[in-house]
Image: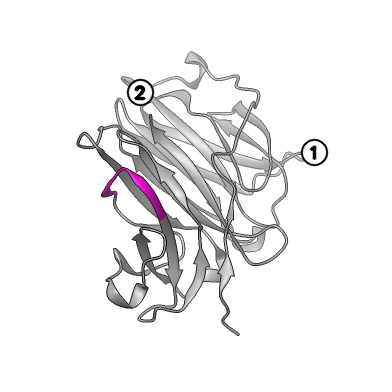
Amino acid sequence: MFGRRLGVGIGVLCVAAAFLLAASCGGGGAQSEMRFLNASPDLGTVNVLLDTATVASSIGYATATDYFAVKSGSRHLQVEPVGTTTNVIDQNVNISDSSQTTVIAANFAANIGTIVLTDSTTAPTSGDAQIRVVNASPSLSGGADIYIVPPGTDLSTVQPVAGGLAFESATGYTSETAGTYEIFFTVPGSKFAYLDSGPVSFSSGQNRTIVALNGAAGGYAILTLADLN
């Protein structure tokens, strides 16, 4: 049964993980950056390896690393639950020169995959913020319409910024005047909200990624990642 669920404003969650990255990653051209988000509800705590070197340790659910340096080119990404040497993710990720990349481990462990996003390093117009939205909640596998509106807005009076955003997909960046907004995920073609982020503030010059997750105790949750400033 559908129901309105209020998202938990988790905020920008970053952990001080053990980063052992360096030139050992090898290959590639200009230095770029990557970060990793564990968005798999039942995967547990994981370690992340890049080109067989551990780059992040003990990353729990709904937790993102800081950006870490990585060579551009094809990088070998492996993710393993803590206490094992079994890779639940084992794939190559292509990193462009001088770029920032977010890799999200998504879906339940039995069907785990990745969402690979290129993050914007271009500052928005003065007075604006850029907002991108990601559907990483397995409970929203049927997709959702996305609204980014000032608090108190009647959704019946506005159109979504993205329609039918599929699970494991992201919108492009939307430029909004800096201020406070609510992000709604609604039943596609409807104004009925699965998820309301509650008020989220965005400052001038910021780029932000808003990620919808399954809540740790049920329902849904929102995670805000800082892409720029």
Q: Residues within 10 Å of mark 1 (few under 14, many from 20)?
A: few
Quarter of the image for the C terminus: give it: top left
Residue 38 in percent (x, y) is at 60, 46
Residue 66 in percent (x, y) is at 53, 29
Identified by mark 2, the residue type is Gly
Q: Residue at x 67, y 42 (%)?
A: 80
Are discs 2 and 1 less than 8 Å apart at CB? no
Q: Nearer the viewer, residue 88 or 20?
A: 20
Quarter of the image for the N terminus: give it: bottom right
Provide the residue designation for mark 1. 83
Looking at the image, tell me whether mark 2 or mark 1 is earlier in sequence order.
2
SS for callout 1:
loop
State the colouring used for the structure image: one colour
Identified by mark 1, the residue type is Gly
Residue 141 in view here? no
Provide the residue designation for mark 2. 28
Q: Nearer the viewer, residue 2 or 43?
A: 2
Q: State the image quarter where residue 2 is shown.
A: bottom right
Give me the C-alpha separation between circle 2 and circle 1: 31 Å
Magenta range is 173-181
Residue 82 in view here? yes
Q: Residue at x 66, y 48 (%)?
A: 61
